[in-house]
Image (cartoon, helix red, strand yellow):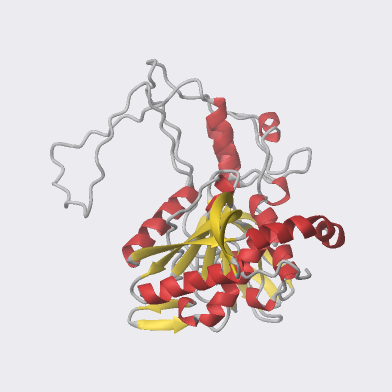
Amino acid sequence: MVQLIMPKMGESVAEATILKWLKKEGDKIEADEPVLEIATDKVDSEVPSPAAGVLSKRLFEEGQVVKVGEVIAMIAAEGESTQTSAPVSQPPATAPAPVPAVPVANGKSNAVPVSHEPLSKTSSSGRFYSPLVRNIAKQEGLSMSELETIAGSGMNNRVTKSDILHHLEQRGQGGTSIAAPVAKPASAPAAAPAASVAPAVSVGGSFEIIEMDRMRKLIADHMVMSKQTSPHVTSYVEADVTNIVKWRDKVKSAFEKREREKITFTPIFIEAVCQAIKDFPMVNVSVDGSRIIKKNFINIGMATALPSGNLIVPVIKNADHLSLTGITKAVNDLANRARNNKLKPEEIQDGTFTLTNVGSFGNVMGTPIINQPQVAILAVGAIRKKPAVIETPEGDTIGIRHMMFLSLSYDHRVVDGSLGGSFLRRIADYLEKFDVNRNF
């Protein structure tokens, strides 16, 4: 009997929701054949079978949330009995919490009638709706016709939890709901003091309460954990990237015509980072207790903003083995699929260094938070024209140059100022020495 395990879906992701079983109990399965579809708030994915056989037992139902590493099904080998001697107890399905009527600023209730219209998992248009989405729709009184109007960001335009919650938020902007406090029984024992208590926030009719979505909660926890884990230090340099700007202006039309890809500055920055990591390999490490784990591969994560406002970091594996054209294609592909929720789980794992482009928001510099378990992250700022001193054999002159700030946050447990500062300066050197006559 082979166990089918809920796979790890990326750093900071501890659980996933079962969207759809693709196989029934008793169905034959080939090795690597998809058995079910699962989803986190980062990616939707299929779980393949680790071996050929027969699906003996499904331990969870559609719509249930399963922790990473849990057994989700049993697969019997060909000829093996499908009856397990000690069946794993299946946790009962958790019914969705009812939507309470809560007071709002104008004294009215925001309760909505529960829809009694049957919601099929597949609409007339052929779009699949997960049990979680259908439960929310039923509780909120959404009809199938209204569900069909919601733009889906999941696999095959599937409506995700975030999509339907965003739709409900837009639909209900007429009033702001304030949850009533739960009274504490007089006989209740005093609770142990919390490690840290957030200050109380007074709210009224002029406030809007926005619940964090699950992905935002994961990001928040990951950022707090990073700050608690690593003593952050940030160093800065300013680089003259005039040669890069001139080269890109010169080749971008020909590059797009030949490669059918647009070339941005990001691939050039990644190329320089890879070169600097080879010069300073102790930046490409992670920390395990009192041990330093040195990576002999360079996987560059690129922080990507999503339409929802959340952040995801797809990873370019072995980026130092790619040409500038290869990096460009990887950057464009990953960024496009990230924004359309099409990334595979392995494409957001195993990064060894992260680059974030705060210049894309018009910022000149930033102090990024390290993406654990890495030990450094680079932020590149906006490229701006500035007067600068130009050194020539005939003497110094003043000219208009394209300048950019780079900031490196690093883990001071293992990266000292000398290493961090020298590494950052080396990146700037590679950018400044960029060959304006190079081919692509």
Q: Residue 275, relative to residue 105: is it above or below?
A: below
At which x and y percent is residue 257? 86, 57
Which of 407 and 33 lies nearest the eye of the viewer?
407
Q: Is residue 166 visible?
A: yes
> Residue placed at 60% from the left, 70% from the top?
393
For the point 53% across and 48% down, which residue is it? Answer: 310
Q: Residue at x 68, y 32 (%)?
A: 144
What residue occupies the far right of the structure in this picture? 258
In the rendering, at what x and y percent does residue 222 appear?
A: 42, 58
> Which quadrant: the C terminus?
bottom right
285 to the left or right of 359: left
Q: Is residue 416 above or below residue 103?
A: below
Side of 134 where 264 appears, left or right: right
Which percent across, then down, holds residue 418? 38, 76
Q: Quadrant of residue 140?
A: top right
Report the number of numbered marks.
0
Residue 132 place in picture, x, y as percent: 57, 45
Give me the residue at 61% from left, 45% from top. Answer: 160
Which quadrant holds residue 136? top right
187 vs 396, nearest the viewer: 396
Please say if 417 is above or below 400.
Answer: below
Q: Is residue 73 visible?
A: no
Assign the N terminus to one quadrant of the image.
Answer: bottom right
- Seen from the viewer's position, the closer of residues 38 and 170 is 170
